Amino acid sequence: MALARWRNQNKVIEARPPGILEFHTDAVAVWRTGKRTEARYEHRYEIRSEGTGSRVAYRLRQTAIANPPLRMRLPLMRTLTHRVMIPRFSRRGFANLLRSAEFRGSRGGPVHTSLARPE
């Protein structure tokens, strides 16, 4: 559980309907100790038609971080954070985004979303 609130600023890098959306996030967290963590994340969505629906591929890449919290500095914790925790939280947000898009696209019809594990 984070003991700081992250403040994010997003910038769209590429938007080509209907298939590409990329944006970068500059994030800052100020911890109780007064230390600041600053990071940059790149988000890219690639969407293509498949059957009666679409396949959405999502890539999240951390490209910079200054003063990372302890859980992102210690070798075992860093691995756990990057391989388990970040994908878990990203998956939840990604699923919510897909549900919202499907809901809007179907004008309120049923929602059928499945998330395949990355290959």
Image: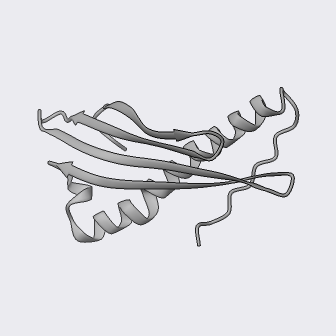
Identify the residue shown where x is 56% and y is 42%.
93
Where residue 73 sits in the image (x, y, percent)?
20, 61
Query: Quick check: 37 above or below 118?
Result: above
Identify the residue shown where x is 29% and y is 64%.
78
Query: Quick check: 111 above or below 42?
Result: above
Q: Is residue 41 left or right of residue 36?
A: right
| Residue 28 lies in quadrant | top left
Where residue 49 sits in the image (x, y, percent)?
75, 53
Q: Among all residues in the image, which is located at the extreme front?
A: 16
Looking at the image, which is closer to me, 110 or 34? 110
Q: Is residue 102 left or right of residue 86?
A: right
Identify the residue shown where x is 86% and y is 52%.
52
Quadrant where the N terminus sits is top left
Q: Among all residues in the image, which is located at the extreme left?
A: 34
| Residue 31 lies in quadrant | top left
Looking at the image, which is closer to me, 60 or 29? 60
Quadrant where the C terminus sits is bottom right
Query: Quick check: 30 above or below 56?
Result: above
Where residue 68 sits in the image (x, y, percent)?
20, 50
Q: How many marks?
A: 0
Identify the residue shown where x is 18% and y is 33%.
32
